[in-house]
Image (cartoon, rainbow, N blue to C red):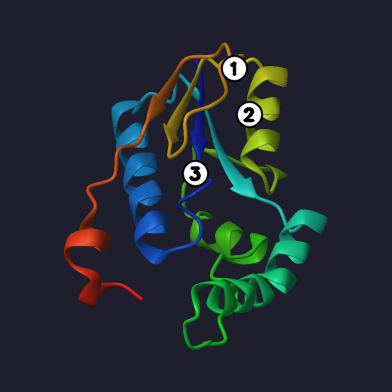
Amino acid sequence: MKIGIETKGFEGWGGGIDFIRHIVSAIEAADEKNQHEKYLLLAKNDFYFHAKKFLYPFRALASSIRDQKPFKWKTYRGFDENYLKYTFQDFQSISLDFPGHSFHSHLKYCKKNKFDILLPCISPPPNNFDLPWIGYLYDFQHKYFPEFFT
């Protein structure tokens, strides 16, 4: 079985990275004989990543103007390829793959490499994505306890 572990949507916050580490740990523990191929799909520092990182503060500025709120300079919060590589290097039985920075590039990679399942998807794949996938439902902590989130 080929298992794809999706990080898109989780790579921009520390709790998301911790969540993915728990998922990888659980899959490794369940596959103690290493019978399955496991692939961790990580964001690549491609043109899209650098453009998004550069444009992020300007998008925040435009939102502040639109919403007539005071502007606060914000930098892009996503972790880069080197950080992600370092963070997940201690997992021995998993391949670290960098198929691109977008969710679409990760889905395309899964289809091309004939994965059997993809998990956890923070956003549902499009209807034409014909591989099985497992979604992630968040618990709205950021809405109910905003004082704990930036």
Q: Mark 3 belongs to which amino acid?
A: Gln
**Residue in the image at 49% along x and 35% along y:** 5
Quarter location, residue 30 = top left
Structural distance between the alpha carbons of marks 2 and 1: 8 Å
Query: Outermost residue toward the left?
Result: 144
Which of pointers 2 and 1 lies earlier in the amino acid sequence? Answer: 2
Q: Position of residue 126 (x, y in %)?
A: 57, 23
**Badge 3 is on which residue?**
92
Which of pointers 2 and 3 lies earlier in the amino acid sequence? Answer: 3
137 is higher (above) or lower (below) than 50: above
Describe the element under mark 3 as helix, strand or loop. Answer: loop
Residue contact at pointers 3 and 1, CB within 8 angstroms: no
**Badge 2 is on which residue?**
107
**Badge 1 is on which residue?**
129
**Residue in the image at 72% along x and 19% along y:** 112
**Residue in the image at 47% along x and 15% along y:** 132
Of tags 3 and 1, the one toward the viewer is 1
Describe the element under mark 2 as helix, strand or loop. Answer: helix
Q: Position of residue 41 (x, y in %)?
A: 58, 40
Q: Mark 2 belongs to which amino acid?
A: Leu
**Quadrant location, the C terminus:** bottom left
